[in-house]
Image (tube, rainbow, N blue to C red):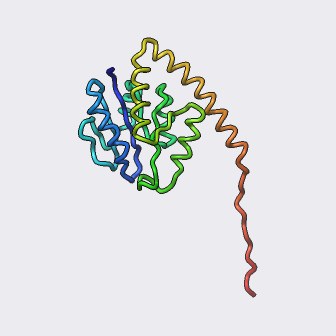
Amino acid sequence: MSGLVLALVGTDHHPFERMVNWIDRAAWHHRDVHFVVQHGATAAPVAAEGHDYLAHDRLVALLHEASVVVCHGGPGTILDARDAGHVPLCVPRDPGLGEHVDGHQQRFAAMMDRTGVVRSVTTHDRFEVELVTALERAARPGAAMLLDTEREASRARLATELDGLIARRPHRFPRFHRFAAAG
C-alpha cells in the first residue's frame, strides 16, 4: 500500500488526543503511507507529519491529493471531504473524554454513517480495519471513477436525509411576551 492519509481534527479548542494517537500508531505500522495530521489544539503527532492548522487552499489541495481522509464529526469538514470525492472515516469527538462539550458529533456521525456519507469509527480496532480497507480500495485500478459515482449517489442520499429532517422539525417562532406595566 501507499498513498496519503489526511487526518483532520478541526478547529475546536478541545484536544483530540485519541484520534491523533490512532493516526500516529497507524503511521508507525504503515510506513509506506504518508500521514498528514491537522492536529489543532492537540499535541503534534510523532510519526505522522503534523500541522496545527492548514490554510483553506492547502486543505483543499490535500483533500484532493489524499487516498483516504479521516476526520472529526464536524459537518463542514465532512462536506469538504465529500466534495473531494471521499467517504471519510469519521471519528466523532466524545464529550465523555473531554473532546467536546456535548454529543452532537456522535449523533451526526451515526446519522451520516447510516446514509453512507461517512464510515463512523468509534473504537481503535474498528479504525484499523476501516483504514486498511480504505487504503486497499483506494489502491485499486479505477478507484477515482468509483469515487465519482459514489459521490453523486451519496449526495443524493444526503439531500434526501436532510430534506426529511427539515420536514420533520417543527418550525418555531419566538414568542413575545407583553408584560403589563405596573401602574
Q: Is residue 113 left or right of residue 15?
A: right
- Residue 75 appears in the rendering: yes
**Residue at horizontal 37 percent and vertical 36 percent from the top:** 7
**Residue at horizontal 50 percent and vertical 20 percent from the top:** 147
Q: Position of residue 120 (x, y in %)?
A: 50, 37
**Residue at horizontal 35 percent and vertical 32 percent from the top:** 58
Q: Toward the viewer: 177 or 5?
A: 5
- Spot the residue most to the front: 125
Assign the N terminus to one quadrant of the image.
Answer: top left
Q: Is residue 150 left or right of residue 64?
A: right
Q: Toward the viewer: 176 or 22?
A: 22
Vertical comparison of 55 with 11: above or below: above
Q: Position of residue 19 (x, y in %)?
A: 37, 42
**Residue at horizontal 29 percent and vertical 28 percent from the top:** 30
Vertical comparison of 52 with 4: above or below: below
Assign the C terminus to one quadrant of the image.
Answer: bottom right
Q: Position of residue 82 (x, y in %)?
A: 50, 30
Q: Toward the viewer: 21 or 164?
A: 21
Vertical comparison of 47 with 152: above or below: below
- Spot the residue most to the top: 141
- Spot the residue most to the bottom: 183
